[in-house]
Image (cartoon, grey):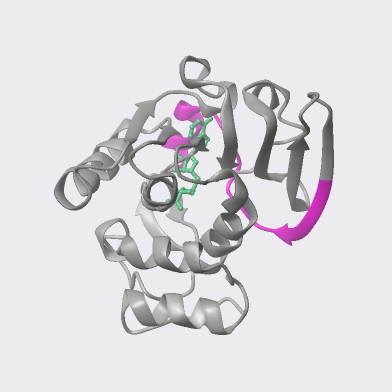
Amino acid sequence: MAWRCSGKTNATLVDNLYQSGIISSKRVVSAMKSVDRAHFATSGNPYEDAPQYIGYSVTISAPHMHGYALENLQDFLKPGMKALDVGSGSGYLTACMASMVGSAGHVVGIEHIHELNEGAQAAVDSHYPDWSIRFVTGDGRKGFAEGAPYDCIHVGAAAPNKPSELLEQLKSPGRMFVPVGTGSQYIIEYNKDKDGSVSEHKLMGVVYVPLTGEHQQRRQS
Ligand code: SAH
């Protein structure tokens, strides 16, 4: 499945994700068409439906995973809403989220490798300079309290277990999309209701790099 949606251009890649049913919302289609993956995946083939290496032992996630995430979070990425992207890496998904919340909204990407943030910032400065995005360098396991609470939180690396600190930074109501687990990993959708109670749903098995310490990750690269 991972390869099925590859395209020759950004637009055909997104059309293929739509035709395969991975994304069905017109808002998600238009967000993914408004952000060219080639601006963020600078080595490898940006339009292949597979992860591409971006340095420092990590990859930009595959387009179908970005599609699933945006589709899942779309009701919490409405114009004017606030979102947090933990482990923002290339900055691609952060930009898609910013496209959806618009200029009245705001998205924070938190990433612990400052060189990746510099690349993400440069791509946004060159191609999407008016969008409401802030890249922060720091330990995303703690979230970014300064910008909280968020309507939604996307986590791009696997948490070992329930990410309680991040859940505290979610609005009521709000939603988090996060891979969880050490051996087997699953995407867990956490929903905080209007009274602050949290429920969880296991969505699918996945393979993500773990949320880790900066020095530990740099030692591996
Ligand atoms: N969603 C991004 C990156 C996915 S890879 C994209 O698609 O481009 C996971 C990212 O999480 C990597 O960039 C890695 O450096 C980052 N990461 C891992 N542990 C982290 C931590 N504790 N704090 C912040 N970022 C972290």
In front here: 153 or 47?
153
The residue lying at 32 percent from left, 62 percent from top is 34
In front here: 103 or 89?
103
The residue lying at 75 percent from left, 60 percent from top is 205
**Could you tell me which quadrant the N terminus lies in?**
bottom right
Q: Is residue 136 left or right of residue 210?
A: left
The residue lying at 49 percent from left, 58 percent from top is 61
Is residue 84 something that shows in the picture?
A: yes
Percent position (x, y) of residue 70?
55, 56
Q: Is residue 31 above or below residue 91?
A: below
Q: Is residue 94 left or right of residue 126?
A: right
Q: Is residue 23 above or below residue 193?
A: below
**Could you tell me which quadrant the C terminus lies in?**
top left
Q: Quadrant of residue 94?
A: top left
In front here: 161 or 172?
172
Is residue 3 something that shows in the picture?
A: no
Percent position (x, y) of residue 181?
75, 44
Q: Quadrant of residue 9?
A: bottom left
Q: Is residue 20 magenta?
A: no
Percent position (x, y) of residue 188?
75, 47
Percent position (x, y) of residue 76?
59, 44
The residue lying at 48 percent from left, 74 percent from top is 49
Q: Which residues are magenta?
A: 201-220
Residue pushed farthest left? 126
**Total numbered labels:** 0
